[in-house]
Image (tube, rainbow, N blue to C red):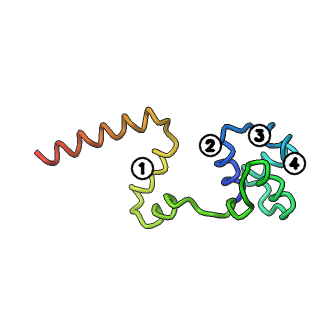
């Protein structure tokens, strides 16, 4: 869980694994294993180094995205739809929204 949050924040900020390793002093291999769930329980010292390098607090690594919290209450098909949409580029999300609008128009006629 914490590893995927690190990867999410790192990717959103456009920080490479190598750069995070250099800035945090944590080995690239360890970071990779952490992000991929191989290492699951890093100590607070390591989390502090990573958080500082990302410009966040350690507690930010454990906060759940509000969108993810909302997803928990949705039906399975909606969860799948949102999780897939989160992975799309902004341009492709706009295309999906246009398709949804077409379906809405069809339902309203």
Question: Which of the 4 quarters of the picture holds residue 21?
Answer: top right
Q: Name the residue under label 2.
A: 12
Which mark lies nearer to you, 2 or 1? 2
Which mark lies nearer to you, 3 or 2? 2
- Disc 2 is placed on an element classified as helix
Task: Name the N-terminal-most of marks 3 and 2.
Answer: 2
Task: Name the N-terminal-most of marks 3 and 1.
Answer: 3
- Disc 3 is placed on an element classified as helix
- Against 75, residue 109 (above or below) is above
Instruction: Give left or right: position of 90 versus 107.
Output: right
Task: Name the N-terminal-most of marks 2 and 4.
Answer: 2
- Against 2, residue 12 (above or below) is above
- Disc 1 is placed on an element classified as helix
Q: Mark 1 points at which residue?
A: 81
Between 30 and 38, which is closer to the camera in this rendering? 30
Marks 3/2: CA–CA distance: 12 Å
Identify the residue at horizontal 40%, vertical 63% (top origin): 74
Dot 2: within a 10 Å radius of its alpha carbon, few (fewer than 14), some, or many (20 or more) residues? few
Identify the residue at horizontal 73%, vertical 59% (top origin): 57
Q: Residue furthest left?
A: 109
* Numbered circle sitting on residue 26: 4
Instruction: Give left or right: position of 18 versus 9.
Output: right
Q: Mark 3 points at which residue?
A: 17
Marks 2/4: CA–CA distance: 20 Å
- Against 28, residue 49 (above or below) is below
Which mark lies nearer to you, 1 or 4? 4
Task: Name the N-terminal-most of marks 2 and 1.
Answer: 2
Task: Name the N-terminal-most of marks 4 and 3.
Answer: 3
Dot 3: within a 10 Å radius of its alpha carbon, few (fewer than 14), some, or many (20 or more) residues? some
- Residue 107 drawn at (x, y percent): 16, 48
- Residue 106 drawn at (x, y percent): 16, 42
């Amino acid at each position: 869980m914490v590893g995927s949050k690190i990867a999410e924040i790192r990717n959103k900020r456009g920080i490479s694994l190598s750069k995070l390793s250099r800035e945090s002093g944590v080995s690239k291999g360890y970071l990779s294993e952490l992000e991929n769930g191989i290492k699951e329980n890093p100590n607070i010292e390591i989390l502090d180094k990573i958080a500082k390098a990302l410009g966040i607090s350690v507690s930010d690594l454990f906060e759940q995205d509000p969108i993810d919290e909302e997803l928990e209450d949705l039906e399975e098909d909606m969860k799948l739809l949102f999780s897939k949409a989160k992975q799309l580029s902004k341009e492709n999300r706009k295309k999906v929204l246009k398709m949804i609008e077409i379906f809405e128009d069809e339902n309203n006629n």
